Amino acid sequence: MPPIARAASGCLFGLAYGDALGAPTEFMSMEQIRRHYGDMGPDDLPGTPARVTDDTQMTIAVAEGLLSALEHPPFTPDLVLPRWRRHFIDWFHDPENTRAPGNTCLRACRNLDDGVPWVKATVHGSKGCGANMRVAPVGLAPGLTDEQRAGAAQLQAALTHGHPTGLVASELTAFAVWWLREGMDPADLPGALRERCHEQRTVYHSRWLQDLWQQPAVPDPQTFISRGWDECLAVLDRLDAALARADRDADPCEITGAGWVAEEAMATGLLCFLLFPDDPVAAIRRGAAGSGDSDSIACLAGAFAGAHLGMDAWPAEWAGRIEYAGDLARFARAWD
């Protein structure tokens, strides 16, 4: 199938729409959400501008560094790493960094700001969803080899989240975005992700990750990274179970998880998208109306839906209401 028209616009704006829609419900129970918004959750962006969270802010940081690096080929870790480091530190100091940012990101960025080498600055035991809620730009950039896309996806995660499952979930999220923008049928996506898990299970991208794997009780890089692939395979089993049930009205977090950790955010975001593959607004509403990390789940669902359907699938008037619309449009122009 041909690539999706305006997929980068659809993905980036969809990510922000989901983030904004899910932000007010992030710490609400299902009972509270249903009482305030009905069974399907919020149905319109909150306010003008519709404020986003750190999910969109950090996506912009990843996009800024990536776009700058791609303008100076060849694309290598040595080229993009200092750019990402600078933009992550800029985000850390941004006075608008008041949107309930994750402790892992704050701690790691503080270490980066103090000049600590990134391999030591990262939080090694964390696989929080902050690793992959911001990776969509890596999935949108054209012209990358699979090795570059995988290495870059894992590196941007590794700057803050050093756990192998955070790295792998980020790679799988980036490839899901890429495959969807290139025209993959959504029904084929879980199988393609599972196949990549098996193919890459012992592949450690040392050119990108340096010696991140060297931790107590880890004998070699293959052992380190295989844990991430195994945990992501396990959550894909849960995704298959949720899709087999196909209950569009249930809490999306019930089977695939609440999304506070990377592999669950990926799987539950995918579930919301795959339950409504041709209705992007319903997909992000389902993500926002869940008992877990609703802004991150909905932002991932929006990224997947937008990459699959393109910008024209979203309500036209939302583009003028979302916060950071100018930045999102700039990246979209580069990658559409």
Image: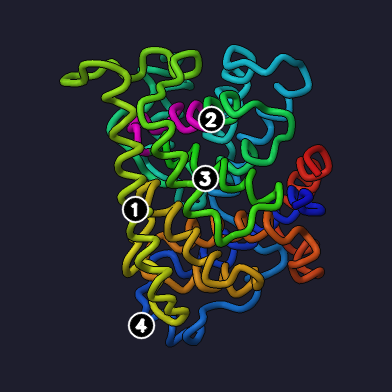
Q: Are marks 3 and 1 in contact (CB under 8 Å)?
A: no
Q: Which mark is residue 150?
A: 2
Residue toward you, 70 or 64? 70
In the image, residue 93 lies in the stretch drawn in magenta: no
Q: Position of residue 9 (x, y in %)?
A: 76, 51
Furthest residue to the left?
217
Secondary structure at badge 2 equals helix
Per the model, the C-alpha gap separating discs 2 and 1 is 19 Å
Closer to the N terminus: mark 2 or mark 1?
A: 2
Q: Position of residue 276 (x, y in %)?
A: 58, 72
Secondary structure at badge 1 equals helix
Closer to the N terminus: mark 3 or mark 4?
A: 4
Closer to the N terminus: mark 2 or mark 3?
A: 2
- Residue type beneath disc 1: Val
Closer to the N terminus: mark 4 or mark 2?
A: 4
Residue that badge 3 annotates? 173
Residue that badge 1 annotates? 235
Q: In this picture, which residue range is highlighted in magenta?
A: 153-165
- Residue type beneath disc 4: Glu
Per the model, the C-alpha gap separating discs 3 and 1 is 13 Å
Q: Position of residue 205 (x, y in %)?
A: 46, 20
Secondary structure at badge 4 equals helix
Q: Main secondary structure of the magenta part?
A: helix
Residue 167 lies, with reference to residue 83, above or below; the image says below
Closer to the N terminus: mark 1 or mark 4?
A: 4
Count of numbered labels shown in the rendering: 4
Residue that badge 4 annotates? 31
Residue 226 lies, with reference to residue 31, above or below; the image says above
Per the model, the C-alpha gap separating discs 1 and 4 is 26 Å
- Residue type beneath disc 2: Ala
| Whether residue 123 is visible | no
Quadrant where the C terminus lies?
Answer: top right
